[in-house]
Image (spheres, rainbow, N blue to C red):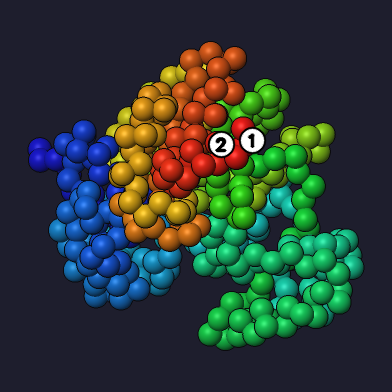
Amino acid sequence: MSFPVIGVIGGGQLARMMAPAATALGVRLEVLAEGPDVSATTAARHSVGDYRDLQTLRDFVAGVDVVTFDHEHVPAEHLEALLAAGVNLQPGPAALRYAQDKLLMRAACDRLGLPNPAWAAVSTVAELIGFGDRQGWPVVLKTPRGGYDGKGVRVVRSASDAESCVDWFELVSPTGFEALLAEEMVDFSRELSAQVARTPSGRTAPYPVVESIQTDGVCDVVTAPAPGLNAGTAQAAQEAAVTLAEGLGVTGMLAVELFETPGIGPGFMVNELAMRPHNSGHWSMDGAVTGQFEQHLRAVLDLPLGSTEPLGAFTVMKNYLGGANQDLYSAFPAAMAAHPEAKIHAYGKSVRPGRKIGHVNVTAARPEDLGAARRAAEGAAEIISEGPEGHQDQGQQEQS
């Protein structure tokens, strides 16, 4: 039997990081990239094409055994057409729609009995005001599709503030959104993430629940497992992730982003879903027996899943964003010398302010080493983002 070919729609950093896992398994990866210079093009065989064009998708899938995704933005009607033609999609469109549409996701959480913020579909400013008056202000207004990293999210603090949202409701039309999503603003202590892998034959493997610190709507630091998390809450969060994976028919990796709400329900509420490897799981590349990218490939191929056991007491993942340093590689010697325990991952992206261009993982062997691991991850990331000179200048300012 020949080794299978996996097609990945989308050429971002997630597809790029699937490539080493595919190589290790002897599996060939083919990527449909959005352009000739996106992340995955330097790591995997690829073709360039528009994932929004059905014929481009048909041409791409003709030479692969199973298709998976770097993102959730492929039009649902195209996925249905591919499925009808017998293409092996993992996950399939019936599951992906819950990651593509937040209104459907909220209704699914209610149906499965999982803790959910109060919410409503609103089509007018008047309906938004009605929800806020009933539920209490402020409320969070979201576009149901297309938002990520804090985009498509707006905090509405009062009825008068709602009047300024009229431009958002212009998006609600026969050719746009059916409605927007209004949610209560949850009073949470921190954000968590629960990941699970699921195979087409129904095997599941949950990962430890992690703490995710967001900065300006972008994942900044992840600590795995989440420090100080109540054991009952951790178990309930893992069970919720499995319930969602099974109830929605997810295959591959599922990330369930959560609000921690101590003393309320099981101690968390569901925030959002991602049906692919996720930023909150990058720690597992160096901190778990089976990293999320290998696990995703195992799952979509319906292979037995790997162990999700951590390799240390904690692992800290720190994203680094575009900063003053335009030549990232020039900073690697300084970062590696200062923090030899750090595992550096670069996404092959050009540097732009605020753009996610890589991450650093550091594993703490003992619980008491967590602080040192966090400082090492943050220090290495800062050197890469700002350059050795900028890092030294800041250090001198802090000392003075």
- Amino acid, disc 2: Gln
**What residue appears at the point 89 percent right and 68 percent down from the top-left corner?**
133
How packed mark 1 is, by other alpha carbons closer than 10 Å (few <14, some 14-19, many 20 or more), is: few
Instruction: Tell me which corner region of the image, top left, top right, bottom left or bottom right, holds residue 149.
Output: bottom right
Q: Position of residue 273 (x, y in %)?
A: 55, 51
Q: Residues within 10 Å of mark 2 (few under 14, many from 20)?
A: few
Report how far apart the C-alphas of labels 1 and 2 lie in the structure. Answer: 6 Å
113 vs 286, nearest the viewer: 286
Q: Amino acid at mark 1?
A: Ser
Residue 210 pos. (x, y %)? 57, 33
- Relative to 226, 183 lies left or right: right
> Residue tagged by mark 2?
396
Quadrant (top left, top right, bottom left, bottom right) of the N terminus = top left
For image coordinates 82% across by 74% down, the residue present is 161
Quadrant in the picture for residue 104: bottom right
Q: Residue at x 86, y 69 (%)?
A: 158
Classify residue 142 by image quadrant.
bottom right
Measured along the vertical axis of the image, is residue 18 above or below residue 9? above
Pick the residue in front: 35 or 62: 35
Q: Residue at x 32, y 34 (%)?
A: 333
Tell me the SS state at disc 2.
helix
Q: Which residue is mark 1?
A: 400
Q: Is residue 230 visible?
A: yes
Left or right, 56 with respect to 169, comes to: left
Q: Do we see residue 210 in this rendering?
A: no
Q: Is residue 82 above or below residue 188?
A: below
In the image, 119 versus 330, the foreground residue is: 330
Residue 391 coordinates in the image, percent (x, y)? 48, 40
> Is the residue under label 2 in contact with that under label 1 (CB below 8 Å)?
yes
Where is residue 40? Give x, y as percent.
27, 54
